[in-house]
Each structure stands twice: as structure tokens, then as C-alpha cells.
């Protein structure tokens, strides 16, 4: 059997002969499912809007060109929180499998899907809010051999003036029980604690337990891999590629209650966001320049 790809009704689904699969919504180029060994690795809210009316609450939304509410007095200041990439309609550019060669990563059986977004495809609002000539290519590679999902974002400046951006792959990972999980690989890094006081702290312990609301922006991380360990066993390894920042987020009880698209309300027990990106300061791109960054996630199931 060969890897297969189906594209219909605004979605692209790829399946490997092993049965592992990935599903991407063209709205936001949001990965909404990644299954390995029959088990879902991502968390998607039961109330997530999948009809293009709102960014998806779950999966892997793409944050670009600003992270969080944009600062005042910056070129992104009129954009919504987390920018427009997660709420734009992307184009499916096609697939390549190991048979056709030219693969990024992933082992023998793997399939790569490419998605594109450029200025011309934006809504009229977004075009006005951020009037720069940009090109994004998002490549999602499902690897069978090592049960990996690689997601890479390539950003290029196709205009005549330079501009700045931030980016983040806002992955919601699924876990059986958050109280039995630890997040490893962030020890000694500095972070801004958005829940506490927005001040800077240093991660003093090698692993983090999630026992309440967490919203931390780790920057300039020394280790390249952050791991989710459940019941003392490795569950997911999230390896950064050309990225040094990560956000760890769990809304816990009260914040989950406040989000209309977060269901079930106790779903915070079954997810944790470990988001890789470039969110500390800004990446500047000169005309004609290209930048690339992303992640390789390995499932231990
Ligand atoms: C995280 C931020 O990346 O995204 C949080 O650090 C934020 O502060 C969360 O609440 C979700 O954002 P949104 O816009 O999808 O509700």
C-alpha cells in the first residue's frame, strides 16, 4: 500500500500504510488531527468552530504575524490577537511522498503536504491592517517510521520594504490526565509568567507539573526538545527547529469556563499547549529574504 491523500470540502487528509494519519483544515491551515497507532495526539475542543467562523480551539493553529495582543505603535497594532494566519483561508499546494522523493524528514514512509498563504489571499480587513507583500508556505510532514509530525513555516518577503513578524505553532496536545504529566526540557530557562505578574522568572526545576492555570513564555531555551511525560513515561517529544521560544499554556478551570468554544469544560484535564515559536522581540525580513522555523513532534505511542 501507498500513502494516500484526500482533499475535499476544505480539508486535506493524508494516511500512511501503517494507518497513521493527519488532517488539515484549509481554514488557518490548522492541523486538526494527528493519529499514530490508532490514538489521537492532539486535543480539539468539542465546541471548536470548524466552519471558518472563528480560529479553531485546538489542534495546531498558526500564530502570525503577531503573538498575543499586538503592541501599540507597531505595524501589527491593528491586527487581532495572534494575527491573521489562523483565520485566513489557505491554499493547498500539493503533496509529495517518499516515492516521489524530496522529503524534509520522516523516515521511509512519509508524506508531506504544503499549504500557502500570501497577501492577495487575505480578507480585505487583514490586507488593510497589515499591508505587506508576504508569502507563507507551511509544510506538514507525517512520518511513519518514527511516528513524527513535522510542521515547518517558511516566511518570505516578496515586497520592496522590510517588515517584522512573530510566529508560533500553537499546538494543543492531548493527554489522558494532566495531573499525571510533567513537562521536561525547560530547566534553567527564563520565562515571563503571564498568570502571576508578567515579570521574568527562571525555571528552577527540570520538570514542570501543571496544577493550576499556566501561561508562560519561555525564551532563548537552551535545550532543543521539550517533552511531555505521562505516568513517568515519555508521551510526546517536541523538537524545535530554528526556534528558541516556547509557550506553555493550560487555562485550568476558570479560564476554560470563560471560553465559549472550550468544551467539555473539564477538557483542561486532557490537554496542554506546548507552543514553539519566535515571540521574543521581532524577526525582521528584508525584501527578497526568507526565514524558516518549525517543529518535529515524536509520539511515543
Ligand atoms: C496562548 C497565550 O499562546 O494562547 C495565552 O499565551 C492565550 O495568553 C492563549 O490565552 C489562547 O489564545 P486565544 O486567542 O486562542 O484564546
Image (cartoon, grey):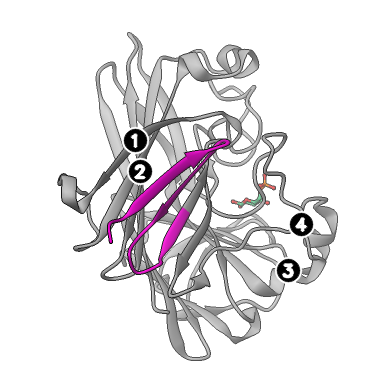
Q: Earlier in the sequence, mark 3 or mark 2?
A: 2
Q: Kindly check if marks 3 and 4 are in contact, taking CB atoms under 8 A apart as contact.
A: yes
The disc label shown at residue 24, or none: none
The residue pinned by badge 1 equals: 94
- Tell me the quadrant of the picture where the C terminus can be found: bottom left
The residue pinned by badge 4 equals: 262
Q: Earlier in the sequence, mark 1 or mark 4?
A: 1
Residue 256 or 21: which is nearer the viewer? Answer: 21
Q: Earlier in the sequence, mark 3 or mark 1?
A: 1
The residue pinned by badge 2 equals: 113
Choose mark 3 or mark 1, whichever is in front: 1
Q: CA distance from mark 3 to mark 2?
A: 29 Å
Q: Earlier in the sequence, mark 3 or mark 4?
A: 4
Q: Earlier in the sequence, mark 4 or mark 2?
A: 2
Query: Is residue 186 rendered magenta in the image?
Result: no
Q: Is residue 280 left or right of residue 105?
A: right
Q: CA distance from mark 1 to mark 4?
A: 32 Å
- Residue at 55% x, 46% y: name it: 61
Query: Is residue 5 rendered magenta in the image?
Result: yes
Q: Residues within 10 Å of mark 2 (few under 14, many from 20)?
A: many
- Residue at 27% x, 57% y: name it: 2
- Residue at 40% x, 20% y: name it: 134
**Residues rendered magenta in the picture:** 1-22
Q: Kindly check if marks 1 and 4 are in contact, taking CB atoms under 8 A apart as contact.
A: no
The residue pinned by badge 3 equals: 267
Amino acid at each position: 500500500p501507498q500513502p494516500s491523500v484526500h482533499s475535499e470540502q476544505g480539508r486535506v487528509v493524508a494516511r500512511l500504510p501503517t494507518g497513521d494519519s493527519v488532517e488539515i483544515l484549509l481554514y488557518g491551515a490548522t492541523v486538526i488531527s494527528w493519529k499514530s497507532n490508532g490514538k489521537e495526539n492532539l486535543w480539539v475542543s468539542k465546541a471548536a468552530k470548524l466552519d471558518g467562523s472563528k480560529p479553531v480551539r485546538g489542534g495546531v493553529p498558526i500564530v502570525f504575524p503577531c503573538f498575543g495582543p499586538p503592541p501599540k505603535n507597531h505595524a501589527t497594532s491593528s491586527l487581532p490577537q495572534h494575527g491573521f494566519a489562523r483565520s485566513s483561508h489557505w491554499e493547498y499546494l500539493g503533496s509529495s511522498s517518499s516515492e516521489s522523493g524530496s522529503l524534509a524528514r520522516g523516515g521511509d514512509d512519509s508524506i508531506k503536504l504544503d499549504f500557502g498563504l500570501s497577501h492577495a489571499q487575505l480578507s480585505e480587513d487583514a490586507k488593510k491592517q497589515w499591508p505587506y507583500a508576504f508569502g507563507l508556505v507551511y509544510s506538514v510532514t507525517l512520518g511513519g517510521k518514527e511516528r513524527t509530525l513535522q510542521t515547518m513555516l517558511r516566511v518570505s518577503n516578496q515586497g520592496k520594504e522590510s517588515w517584522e513578524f512573530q510566529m508560533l505553532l500553537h499546538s494543543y496536545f492531548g493527554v489522558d490526565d494532566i495531573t499525571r504529566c510533567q513537562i521536561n526540557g525547560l530547566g534553567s530557562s527564563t520565562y515571563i509568567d503571564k498568570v502571576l505578574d508578567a515579570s521574568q522568572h527562571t525555571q528552577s526545576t527540570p520538570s514542570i507539573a501543571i496544577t493550576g492555570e499556566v501561561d508562560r513564555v519561555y525564551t532563548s531555551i537552551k535545550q532543543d526538545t521539550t517533552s511531555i511525560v505521562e505516568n513517568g513515561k515519555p508521551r510526546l517529544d517536541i523538537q524545535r527547529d530554528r526556534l528558541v521560544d516556547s509557550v506553555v499554556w493550560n487555562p485550568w478551570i476558570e479560564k476554560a469556563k470563560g471560553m465559549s468554544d472550550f468544551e467539555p469544560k473539564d477538557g483542561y484535564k486532557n490537554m496542554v499547549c506546548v507552543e514553539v515559536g519566535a515571540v521574543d522581540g521581532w524577526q525582521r525580513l528584508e525584501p527578497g529574504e526568507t526565514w524558516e522555523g518549525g517543529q518535529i513532534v515524536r509520539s511515543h505511542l
